[in-house]
Image: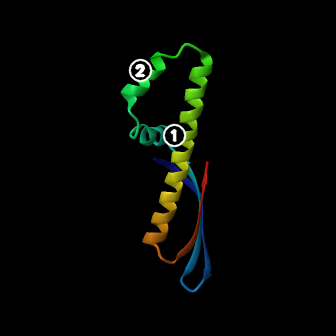
Amino acid sequence: IIRSIHDVKATDLGPDSVRFKAEVNFDGREVTRLHLQKLDLERILKDIQGYTTVTELERFLLEHGEQVVDKLGSEVDRIEMKLKKDNPEIRHVDLEIL
């Protein structure tokens, strides 16, 4: 899901306290694949085949585009929590999406 990591910085904030910052380049296809795993693609295919207007298609794409962005946000949160859990000295994690 992560393509690359850049500009990694760890700042010592005092005894047993570190701030971790990094820029993360996510693989959009993999984020989308994670989103698709929770969907009924057969049902979606039938729905799309019933569309007769560009407006219907646009509404569908906007809805699913928003869900993919939400999935990306939840993945960032998950990674930040895992970093903190695996490294108790990390008090603050700031992952920025490239």
Q: Is residue 92 above or below residue 44?
A: below
Residue 24 locus on image (x, y percent): 56, 52
Q: Residues within 10 Å of mark 2 (few under 14, many from 20)?
A: few
Q: Residue 23's quadrant in the figure?
A: bottom right
Report whether 88 appears left or right of 43. Answer: right
Q: Nearer the viewer, residue 54 or 28?
A: 54
Q: Position of residue 65 (x, y in %)?
A: 56, 35
Quick one: SS at disc 2? helix
First of labels 1, 2 by sequence position: 1
Q: From the image, tell me which residue sits under label 1.
A: 28
Above or below, comparing residue 13 to residue 26 in the picture: below
Residue 6 vs 81, above or below: the answer is above
Question: Which residue is rendered at x = 61% and y = 48% of the image?
Answer: 98
Per the image, label 1 sits on a secondary structure element best described as helix
Q: CA distance from mark 1 to mark 2?
A: 25 Å
Give left or right: position of 28 versus 19: left
Residue type indicated by callout 1: Gly
**Residue ID for mark 2:** 46
Local packing at callout 1 (Cα closer than 10 Å; few below 14, some 14-19, many 20+) is some
- For this rendering, which residue is in front, 76 or 1? 76
Q: Amino acid at mark 2?
A: Lys
Q: Residue shown at 55%/46% (left/top)?
A: 70
Q: Residue at x 62, y 20 (%)?
A: 55
| Residue found at x 57% / y 22% | 57
